[in-house]
């Protein structure tokens, strides 16, 4: 996926103990940002995953974007 390395690097930058990031692509969601106007406020990408192959270290990253 485009920008996957950037997303992984961001998660790693949050804690020096994070050595690897596993993104759960099946739970990836695109959602429309609602702002009270007919055209909406764009889109957001929600990523979920875990770090260091540990199921107890779940994370969610939300990023806004202009395109779906």
Image: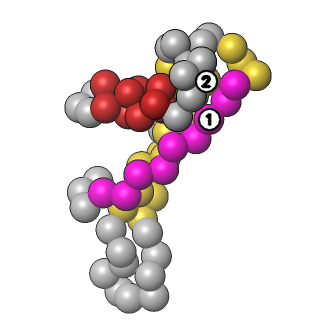
Image height of 21 relative to 66, above or below: above
Q: Position of residue 45 (x, y in %)?
A: 42, 49
Taking the view exactly as shown, the residue that stands out farthest to the front is 16
| Picture quadrant of residue 51 | top right
Q: Position of residue 13 (x, y in %)?
A: 46, 31
Is 50 placed left or right of 9 in the picture?
A: right
Which stretch did the figure color magenta? 57-65
Q: Which residue is mark 1?
A: 59
Determine whether label 1 and label 2 are within 8 Å by CB. Answer: yes
Look at the numbered disc 1 and give the secondary structure of its residue.
strand
Tell me the crowding category of disc 1: few under 14, some 14 to 19, or many 20 or more residues within 10 angstroms, Cα based.
some
Is 52 placed left or right of 5 in the picture?
A: right
Residue 50 tag number: 2
Residue 4 drawn in magenta: no
Chief secondary structure of the magenta portion? strand
Image height of 16 relative to 65, above or below: above
Please report the residue visible at 31 percent of the width from the left and 32 percent of the height from the top: 6
């Amino acid at each position: 996926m485009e920008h996957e390395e950037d997303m992984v690097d961001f998660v790693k930058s949050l804690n020096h103990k994070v050595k690897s990031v596993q993104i759960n692509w099946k739970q990836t969601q695109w959602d429309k940002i609602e702002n009270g106007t007919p055209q909406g406020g764009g889109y957001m990408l929600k990523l979920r995953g875990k770090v260091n192959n540990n199921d107890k270290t779940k994370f969610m990253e939300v990023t806004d974007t202009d395109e779906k």
